[in-house]
Image (cartoon, grey):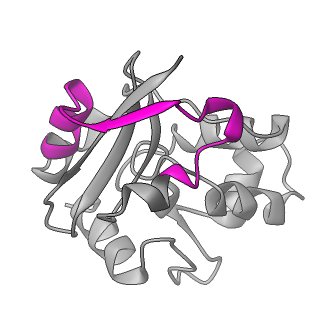
Amino acid sequence: MSTAVWATRDTPAGPFTAVVADDGHVLASGWTASVDELLGLVHRSLAPADVREGDLGPVGEAIDRYHDGELSVIDDVPVRQRSGPYRELAWDVLRTVPAGAPVTYTGYAEKTGRPAAVRAAAGACAHNAAALFVPCHRVLRSDGSLGGFRYGLAVKRWLLDHESV
């Protein structure tokens, strides 16, 4: 039986909640106070049988340190998501996009090795359950505009500004 812990932390961009498996992998995270919203994003094969509020351990420390300006602290936090082969590859590739160097959806598709897969790359962003740790906020439209973001464009703008320092 798998278990997970969740907690909500106050951040300058708003409340941030994470769901972390008992082995320390992030299953879902984002700028919301609703754990139920995040649990709905977890692939059914990864859904924990028991979820309790508690200490996020190193993941919680990484959340705080990132928002305090240590931008690379999120890079090595383990994440577990499931989908099709392209989407899983796209999430792994997204974790290589450095803070302060956002890419366009076209550039993101190119980084995955499938330059024509712009819509599929955008779909990977849209279905990303582990916001921040898989930094979908670092992908922009080709005209430089923000595009979409599950947690709102004000949060996306704050994150990009935070990372541009």
Q: What span is colored magenta in the figure?
A: 39-64
What residue is drawn where x is 42% and y is 81%?
153
Q: Is residue 47 above or below residue 24?
A: below
Q: Position of residue 39 (x, y in %)?
A: 51, 50
Determine which quarter of the picture holds residue 4: top left
Q: State the residue in front, 60 or 113.
A: 60
Q: Is residue 48 above or below residue 119?
A: above
Q: Position of residue 16 (x, y in %)?
A: 27, 57
Where is the N terminus found, in terms of image quarters?
A: top right
Q: State the residue in front, 55 or 106.
A: 55
Is 161 placed left or right of 102 in the picture? left
Determine which quarter of the picture holds residue 83: top right
Is 39 placed left or right of 110 in the picture? left
Q: Is residue 147 above or below residue 48?
A: below
* Residue 63 part of the magenta segment: yes
Is 89 placed left or right of 20 in the picture? right
Which residue is situated farthest in the left direction here? 68
Where is the C terminus found, in terms of image quarters?
A: bottom left
Is 114 placed left or right of 44 in the picture? right
Q: Position of residue 31 (x, y in %)?
A: 33, 63
Is residue 101 visible to us here?
no
What residue is drawn where x is 55% and y is 30%?
80
Q: State the residue in front, 105 or 56.
A: 56
